[in-house]
DNA sequence: ATTAGGG
DNA sequence: CCCTAAT
């Protein structure tokens, strides 16, 4: 036990942080879940605060995860993923099944599912477990939670012990879960820790009520999902709801379902958690979705950070100060749309946020620059001719050039000769420009000379002439650089 | 840090 | 436009 806690503590920080992200994900996933997750976060924070003490159990996902991880060194990861996955799934499906229990469902679920996991492990490893559960629970003296924890402790301890003796695993789990659940509940609701009697009674009541709360739950969900946009409000609702729910104990079937669900199909998709953990773009997306939902002001801040970080667009800002003037025909502004984190709303499509049309004058400048400095000297061109255009990066110039080539048809006269469709060109370039582009294209074959590649490939396939094609047909590498050299 | 390529 | 790999 002791060691467990230690490891837990040590791992707690990292894990927790990670978890935080993960938690952030689902938040966006489901409106109704919103509140619940928020709770999770709160719990998390508390966890941090009490880090010194130990990792409690029923506190929240974060903690639980930490513990689990530390417990199961090897499958720790998997486990975590699974758990989280489960969580996510749970959230995902708030609409169906138990999730109707929605708020409480999801949140309790996490807790007790986790606990189940934990319990299982414990059971497997041996008899000393019972105390473990108790200890860890009691050791988590978080200010607001301590009470409930204590309350739960008693039960979990006793029940666990008993059952262990009787070797009735399922029951044990059930009980533990139940207890845990209560603990979690209370802590979340900030309610007074009921006496053991109270718990007992509550459990019973829960059982009874469980069958009829569907409508109720639905209602509650509805409230939440149609929510008012104030998170606090939501929270209070949830709180209320939870309070109400608090008296209800999940039926055994419910628990079983949940557990099976978790262990079952959860395995299949671990991608979710993983992705969400690292994939920032994903996060952003969610964030956007979130915004679309139009609610939640407080959580946004959290997101904003990431958003801003990402949004700023690769190193562009650092270069030069936004100038507005430059080309006469340029779009007026260059400064406004940029990186206001505040402009999130519009960031619906993260990608391609700032599109700036290339004006003819720009194109001309580009062409001039290319003809002057040569293809490939994009930074130079940018520096010399586009120094005022903060938004045009060398890469952009290059891209534009590529597009020009394409548009001018100078690029690879396709095999069949069916190309050069300028036909669908929205903004046909001035013929003069076109001419120039073509000429330039002739002079500097930027586009990796398909020619060589083509010819190379064509001949290479069979046997390839070493001399002719320069050797490596597949990798454009050799061909590329070589070509370039020749040209220059 | 720049480029080339690909998406 | 954006992203990644290669230089």
Image (spheres, coloured by chain):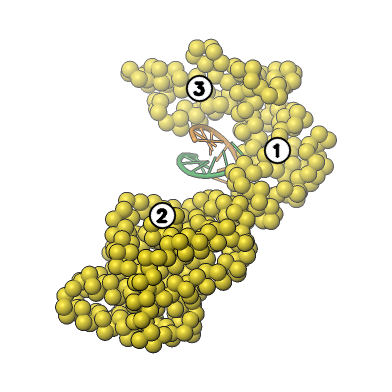
Chain colours: A yellow, B orange, C green
- State which quarter of the image contains the N terminus of chain A: bottom left
The secondary element bearing badge 3 is classed as helix
Q: Residue at x 74, y 20 (%)?
A: A430
| Number of residue marks | 3
Judged by depth in the image, the label closer to the viewer, 3 or 1, is 1
Sequence-first disc among 1 and 2: 2
The residue to which callout 1 is attached is: A356
Using the rendered view, name the quadrant where residue A438 is placed: top right
Dot in front, 3 or 2 = 2
Residue A465: x %, y % from top left: 37, 18
Establish if A310 lies above or below A254: above
Chain that bears disc 1: A
- Please give left or right for residue A111 compared with residue A30 in the image: left
The residue closer to the viewer here, A171 or A322, is: A171
Residue at screen point 50% across, 70% down: A241
In the rendering, at what x and y percent does residue A295 appear? 61, 59
Marks 3 and 2 belong to one chain? yes
Q: Is residue A286 visible?
A: yes
Numbered disc in front, either 1 or 2: 2
* Location of residue A316 in the rendering, given as x and y in whole percent from the top left corner: 66, 48
**Of callouts 3 and 1, the N-terminal one:** 1
> Quick one: quadrant of the C terminus of chain A?
top right
Q: Are marks 3 and 1 on the same chain?
A: yes
Chain letter of mark 3 equals A
On residue A100, which mark appears? Answer: none
Q: Which mark is residue A450?
A: 3
Residue for badge 2: A96
Q: Is residue A400 left or right of residue A33?
A: right
């Amino acid at each position: 036990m002791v060691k467990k806690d230690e490891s837990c503590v040590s791992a707690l920080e990292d894990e927790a942080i990670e978890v935080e992200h993960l938690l952030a994900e689902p938040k966006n996933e489901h409106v109704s879940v919103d509140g619940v997750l928020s709770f999770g976060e709160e719990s998390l924070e508390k966890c941090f605060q009490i880090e010194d003490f130990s990792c409690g159990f029923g506190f929240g996902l974060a903690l639980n995860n930490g513990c689990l991880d530390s417990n199961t060194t090897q499958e720790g990861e998997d486990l975590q993923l699974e758990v989280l996955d489960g969580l996510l799934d749970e959230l995902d499906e708030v609409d169906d099944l138990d999730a109707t229990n929605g708020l409480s469902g999801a949140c309790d679920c996490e807790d007790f599912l986790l606990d189940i996991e934990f319990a299982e492990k414990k059971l497997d490893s041996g008899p000393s477990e019972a105390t473990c559960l108790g200890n860890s629970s009691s050791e988590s003296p978080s200010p607001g939670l301590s009470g409930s924890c204590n309350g739960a402790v008693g039960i979990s301890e006793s029940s666990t012990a008993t059952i262990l003796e009787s070797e009735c695993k399922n029951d044990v789990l059930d009980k533990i879960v139940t207890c845990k659940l209560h603990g979690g509940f209370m802590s979340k609701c900030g309610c007074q820790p009921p006496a053991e009697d109270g718990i007992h009674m509550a459990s019973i009541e829960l059982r009874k009520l469980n069958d009829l709360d569907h409508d109720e739950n639905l209602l509650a969900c509805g409230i939440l999902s149609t929510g008012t946009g104030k998170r606090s409000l939501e929270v209070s609702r949830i709180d209320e709801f939870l309070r109400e729910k608090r008296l209800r104990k999940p039926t055994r079937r419910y628990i079983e379902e949940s557990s099976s669900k978790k262990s079952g199909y959860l395995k299949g998709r671990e991608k979710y958690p993983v992705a969400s953990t690292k994939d920032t773009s994903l996060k952003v997306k969610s964030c956007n979705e979130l915004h679309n939902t139009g609610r939640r002001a407080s959580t946004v801040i959290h997101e904003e950070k990431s958003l801003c970080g990402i949004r700023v667009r690769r190193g562009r800002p650092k270069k030069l100060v936004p100038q507005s003037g430059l080309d006469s025909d340029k779009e007026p502004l260059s400064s406004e749309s940029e990186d206001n984190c505040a402009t999130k709303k519009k960031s619906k499509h993260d990608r391609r946020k700032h599109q700036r049309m290339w004006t003819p004058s720009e194109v001309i400048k580009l062409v001039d620059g290319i003809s002057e400095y040569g293809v490939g000297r994009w930074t130079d061109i940018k520096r010399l001719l586009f120094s005022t255009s903060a938004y045009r990066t060398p890469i952009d110039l290059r891209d534009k050039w590529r597009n020009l080539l394409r548009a001018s048809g100078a690029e690879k006269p396709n095999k069949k000769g069916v190309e050069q469709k300028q036909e669908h060109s929205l903004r046909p370039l001035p013929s003069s420009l076109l001419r120039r582009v073509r000429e330039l294209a002739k002079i500097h074959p930027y586009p990796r000379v398909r020619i060589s590649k083509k010819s190379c490939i064509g001949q290479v396939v069979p046997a390839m002439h070493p001399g002719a094609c320069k050797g490596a047909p597949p990798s454009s590498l050799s061909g590329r650089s070589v070509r370039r050299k020749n040209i220059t």
